Image (cartoon, rainbow, N blue to C red):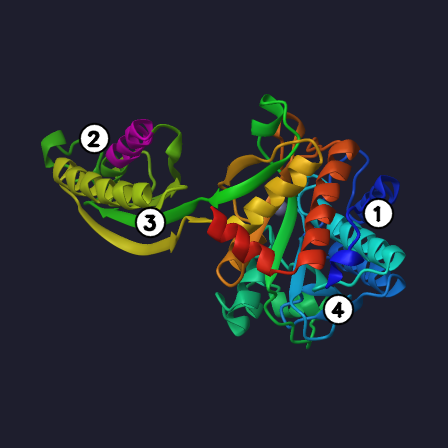
Amino acid sequence: MPETTSPSSVRIDPARLQAMMEAVSVFGGGADGSMTRLTLSPEDGQARDWLATWFRKNGFAEKVDPIGNQFGRLDLASANAPVVMVGSHIDSQPNGGRFDGALGVISACEAILAVRETLEKSGGRSACNFVVANWTNEEGARFQPSLLGSSVFTGAADLAWALDRRDGAGISVGEALESIGYAGTDTVPIPDAYLELHIEGDSVLEREGLRFGAFTRFWGAVKYRLAFLGRQAHTGPTPMAARHDALLAGAYVITDLKALAGEFGLDLHTSVGRMEVYPNSPNTVPSEAVLFIELRSGSQAILAEAETRLLASIEAAVARAEVGHEVRSIDRRAAGRMSPGLVHLAERASDANGAPARSLDTIGGHDAISLAAVCPSIVLAVPSVGGVIHHPTEFTTPEDHAFGTQVLADMLLILANEGLSVLEVEKERR
Ligand SMILES: [Zn+2]
């Protein structure tokens, strides 16, 4: 068995990693450190071409699926061995930062390359093959919803529907893919595990003086589009008692939601981020107020409890403001846990590098959350200076890039040496 020839350690090349980060940052990067690489834009196309060239030069086989997800496969085992996919996204927000997403794709390239070099040197064999993934439209800035490419990949979103999403200028995803040459035809199977290194995008690691984290839970969300229906009237002569003010009902719910979040401490976030008021005139009692309500939590039980309380708050607001109401849409995204086996593997690899893995919650979306529905998945995190993300000052030090990539490479080497059964074993042990 491989034990006799298995290399015990792998070393990534920090200089090569940095050179790659700098190379990809040219596409859409500004002098102030900003990054504007909207998905399927010409800049995104150039960055994809750069990655495709890198794949070719390093012996990775490029594949592009019909939603434009870009993959680079490196076979280190037999063709039907399990596949470990590693990646993230290289699209960005407008005037965003350079590390959100790009680090995950570049570190995947470096970590897999380092594992190959190590195996070649030692003559060791791998138990699995590796694929780098660059997902289309993770950000949701140009096209909505976010996580579009990974959602189509896992079957959670319909391909034809996704290709028909349109940006503010009316251009569809399908047209944008054609224009940069990434309307692919390849079929890429669901992997046996998925790993993603990402900047934390928060300041927990920095505050605690830690350099590595593993997202163990992802938050779920419940989103309501709710209309209160009142009666339009003059704000002057109409007696107060005769009013049916839809906006007032909205105000009651907004304050109730703030109080509700307070009851659950840090485990519940609530918001009304948008309200559409009709007719929206200073001297007309509103006949309609549509609220865009969000509840978010890492606990499915708290989400359910919060939703029950929201419904009670709506009923109370309806009674108090003497209006009607109508639920126009409900979206639910379940809270969940990342693969315990991969969390344990991350802890083992980061301990070996002298830094414990801090358990974190992810509140924002990640492609790994899409993948978690179909295979063991994890997001690993390195510190964000000041917790900044989606801003030109977003920054993670080169040392932390290298550290996160080293832990990632160590995880990949363990999977190469011991096979994916290591994930099952670790799961049972917990
Ligand atoms: Zn990201």
Rounded to the nearest whole Å, what is the CA distance between mark 3 and mark 4?
48 Å
Rounded to the nearest whole Å, what is the CA distance between mark 1 and mark 3?
42 Å
Rounded to the nearest whole Å, what is the CA distance between mark 2 and mark 1?
65 Å
The reply, left or right, for residue 121 in relation to residue 10 is right
Rounded to the nearest whole Å, what is the CA distance between mark 1 and mark 4?
26 Å
Rounded to the nearest whole Å, what is the CA distance between mark 2 and mark 4?
78 Å
Q: Which residue is mark 1?
A: 20
Residue 36 x, y percent position in the rendering: 71, 45
Dividing the picture into quadrants, the one containing residue 243 is top left
For marks 1 and 3, the one nearer the N-term is 1
Q: Secondary structure at mark 3?
A: strand
Q: Which residue is mark 2?
A: 236
Q: Residue at x 77, y 50 (%)?
A: 111
Amino acid type indicated by mark 3: Tyr
Residue at the farthest left position? 241
Residue 191 x, y percent position in the rendering: 61, 65
Q: Give the magenta-colored segment's residue range.
A: 251-264
Q: Would you place residue 427 above or below residue 156 in this image?
A: above
Q: Secondary structure at mark 1?
A: helix
Q: Residue at x 55, y 45 (%)?
A: 343
